[in-house]
Amino acid sequence: MNKMITFVFLVSGLGLWAQDAKLEKDYQAIESKVIEWRRDIHQNPELSNREFKTAEKIAAHLKSLGIEVQTGVAHTGVVGLLKGKKPGKVVALRADIDALPVTERNDLPFKSIVKSEFLGTEVGVMHACGHDTHTAILMGVAEVLSKNKDKIKGTVKFIFQPAEEGAPPGEEGGAKLMVKEGVLQNPDVDAIFGLHINSQTPINTIKYKPGGALASAQRFVINVKGKQTHGSQPWAGIDPIMISAKIIDGLQTIISRETNLTNEAAVISVGKITSGVRFNIIPESAEMIGTIRTLDYEMQKHINTRMEEMVPAIAKAYGAEATIEITTSTAITFNDLDLTAQMAPTLEKVAGKENVTIHKAITGAEDFSYFQEKVPGMFFLLGGMTPGTTESFPHHTPDFKIDDSGLLLGVKTMTQLTLDYLNK
């Protein structure tokens, strides 16, 4: 029996394009579910590597769709595998699922009142970065694609990743551990797509950037060893606090005088200084902890080398000793140039060309970068701000808020990226 297929013709920046009416019907049917899932997850957030109930919810949903499910990946991660009706490539879609140790201040009917322990302190827990929306969107994409397997030429791997915000001290986690445990293998992934909601970008708009889109994040620890003395006799000792100030000044010249900021952005910030116990004692030592953000590996190499040269040299100039240790938290989120050029028309097709823009590099970081180190990847920003909003609050703050009426565009975009990639 022949099936009659209806097409809906839409006008976009690329002209006319045809969309299967069944797919559009599935999109409309999923929107209320996605919003409901998002609000439930928002009301019941869990910290990194502790996303037990969130993982159970995801796994139960995927299983109900007939998707092959693997749990316990990188502690609490969930991976689903959906095989299309025809053979082809393998595309992965990723959503992060963890929340932050932030006490919510929003007056929402589904606000979080969850409490937990973080580093030995009782804290509020909140989805203050939008991972609840990412999770709900990908659950929606899984349902839509599971109902349209006849359109899938190849395989879709759904990756629900824990601990994007960083594993607790002493633990492994996040994308790096998922890669280590083989999430991009069996079957081998050919390309991966990811998104991030943005509270300061209007709903129903998309931003992306070819190449370095988000920064690599590095952590550094500097220890300065001086000589303790009475605060009234600084000449009798070696002041590690004064020397720390000189080191901070020196580090900033690496950015302002040695780094070509017309190439890419770069940042060195000291976020914590610990030294001394009493107002009238010049202490023996000082410790500084901070972050380095770079979007180019050659620039990162230069900055790291100069920091390692400068820190002990400045300390020595004042009669002290200093050491520096630099560790990498995330790599550069680098959108593969060929893949991004290939898939950018899909973004414009779904959202409308006028609603898609290329953003400037962001010095925030994302561990999606560890997937992109292994396979070509594309990461984009999805608008989450209500149009006409006079004040939008940044991510990681108690007032962070997302307009969930913009989530459907995320479902449509991730679904269409998948179909277009596999069918080209």
Image (cartoon, helix red, strand yellow):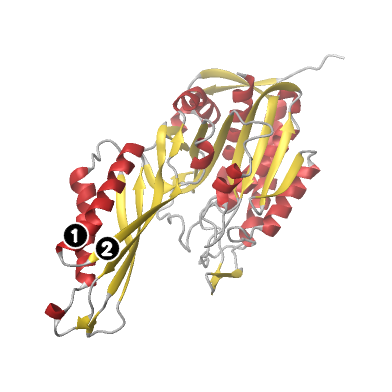
Q: Say left or right for 70 vs 339.
A: right
Asked if residue 74 can be seen in this view, the reply is yes
Number of numbered callouts drawn: 2
Which secondary structure lies at badge 2? Answer: strand
* Percent coordinates x, y for residue 283 in the rendering: 26, 78
Q: Are marks 1 and 2 in contact (CB under 8 Å)?
A: yes
Where on the picture, by quarter, is residue 87?
A: top right
Q: Residue furthest top?
A: 2
Which secondary structure lies at badge 1? Answer: helix
Which numbered dot is residue 398?
A: none
Where on the picture, by quarter, is residue 331?
A: top left
* Percent coordinates x, y for residue 51 in the rendering: 65, 58
134 or 369, which lies in front? 369
Q: Amino acid at mark 2?
A: Ala
Residue drawn where x is 70% and y is 58% of the image: 53
Closer to the chain start, of discs 1 and 2, is: 1
Q: Say left or right for 169 vs 286.
A: right
With respect to residue 23, does 134 lie above or below?
Answer: below
Residue drawn where x is 58% and y is 55% of the image: 98
Label 1 – label 2 distance at C-alpha: 8 Å
Q: Which residue is mark 1?
A: 314
Q: Which residue is mark 2?
A: 322
Residue drawn where x is 46% and y is 44% of the image: 202
With respect to residue 261, does 169 lie above or below?
Answer: below
Q: Amino acid at mark 1?
A: Ile
Question: How would you rate the neighbour count of disc 1 (Cα within 10 Å): few for under 14, some for 14-19, many for 20 or more?
Answer: some
* Percent coordinates x, y for residue 20 in the rendering: 68, 23
User: Quarter holding the C terminus?
Assistant: top right
